[in-house]
Amino acid sequence: MGNLADFYVAVGTVLPLLLLALIWDSRALERLKTEERKLKKDGGNVLFWVKPRVRRYMLFVATVIVAALGLCILELAGFVPNSLALRLILVLAVALTLGSLITRIWVDVIAATAEQQPPAAGDTPQEQQTGRTPA
């Protein structure tokens, strides 16, 4: 039973850290707040991840993490019995979180290192072409 208790302790320790990395990373929410995220077919710049979808997905992932953390605590306290199904649910919760985190890392790194940077909020095309800085 010692190894299984270690599993629940490990998952219960890792999930809050992943939640912090995923939700409260450096300026991710601020950047999302200021970004214009319209579908390309509507003249925007994204194929699928418009703000309402991002909102629903991130709230879903955060809810899964908090629920999984609660299950770890309940199992360690003896309120929920150890089972294969419980361990599978927790592994899937960690996998969902890690998958979401690595996807966001890839997207952020690719966007930050793109040859042509998108215009910053408030920049006009004239300012970008001439390289002038606003007075």
Image (tube, helix red, strand yellow):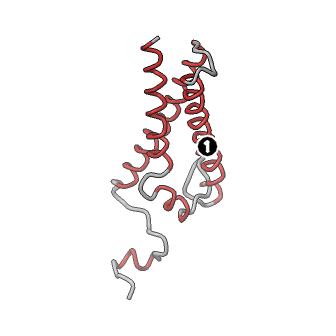
133 vs 24, nearest the viewer: 24
In the image, what residue occupies the spot 36% across and 55% down?
112
Task: Estimate the x, y position of residue 100 in percent, counting from the top left.
Answer: 50, 38
Q: Residue 129 appears in which quarter of the rendering?
A: bottom left
Percent x, y for residue 73?
A: 56, 29
- Seen in the picture, residue 93 relative to 86 is either above or below; the reply is below
Locate residue 84: give its quadrant.
top right
In depth, the one of 65 and 112 nearer the eye is 65
With respect to residue 119, does 70 lie above or below? above
Q: Residue at x 38, y 88 (%)?
A: 135
x 46%, y 26%: residue: 9
Element class at badge 1: helix
Which residue extends farthest front? 77
Query: Which residue occupies the foreground of this view, 116 or 96?
Result: 96
Instruction: Residue at 43%, 20% (x, y): give it.
Output: 6
Would residue 103 appear left or right of 71 to someone viewing this image?
left
Type of amino acid at the residue the image marks with label 1: Tyr
Camera-side residue: 30 or 11?
A: 11
For mark 1, what is the residue? Answer: 57
Q: Is residue 30 above or below residue 13?
A: below
- Can you give x and y, in whole percent of width and height, for residue 10 in the image? 43, 27
